[in-house]
Amino acid sequence: MAKKAKTRVKKKRVRLAFNEGVAHVHSSFNNTIITLSDKAGNVLTWSSGGKIGYKGSKKSTPFAAQVAGEEVAKKALDMGITRVRVIVRGPGGGRESALRAMNATGLQITSITDATPIPHNGCRPRKTRRI
């Protein structure tokens, strides 16, 4: 039996009717995840330190967050999004570097909101680390 030749299908470039989005930067001690959504919260694209190709402790570095931020910004500009509202969560090291990368790539950041969850005497915290 003859094998069928695989045909490549070109991906359509998606141009959106709006030019403003919301970038959620979730920066933990282990990874930085950047999600781009519209105003309603529907996810358009995302990237993280692990998606780029880093494994283990390299995912948590500011450089991995910078590369992830550049990737999200390039995809956003391809879609036609030029202005972004940023919501930052978490205490990780990739917070500022992800924002700087998105700004340097060409996205205009209109506002930055810190939405790090803070317990109001809820659960008992973890025991302190002894190194």
Image (cartoon, helix red, strand yellow):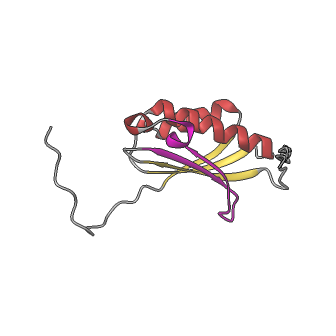
| Numbered-mark total | 0
Q: Residue furthest front?
A: 1
**Residue 10, percent from left and from top:** 86, 44
The part of the chain drawn in magenta is 31-53
Q: Residue furthest bottom?
A: 122
- Residue at 27% of width from left, 69% of height from top? 122
Q: Is residue 116 located in the magenta-colored stretch of the structure? A: no
- Residue at 59% of width from left, 33% of height from top? 101
**Residue 102, percent from left and from top:** 63, 37
Corner quadrant of residue 71: top right
Q: Is residue 89 left or right of residue 3?
A: left
Q: Residue furthest left?
A: 130
Q: Is residue 112 above or below residue 55?
A: below
Of 22 and 14, nearer the camera is: 14
Q: Is residue 55 above or below residue 43?
A: above
Q: Quadrant of the C terminus?
A: top left
Q: Is residue 43 located in the magenta-colored stretch of the structure? A: yes
Q: Is residue 67 left or right of residue 8?
A: left
- Residue at 76% of width from left, 46% of height from top? 81
**Residue 72, percent from left and from top:** 65, 42
**Residue 68, percent from left and from top:** 57, 38
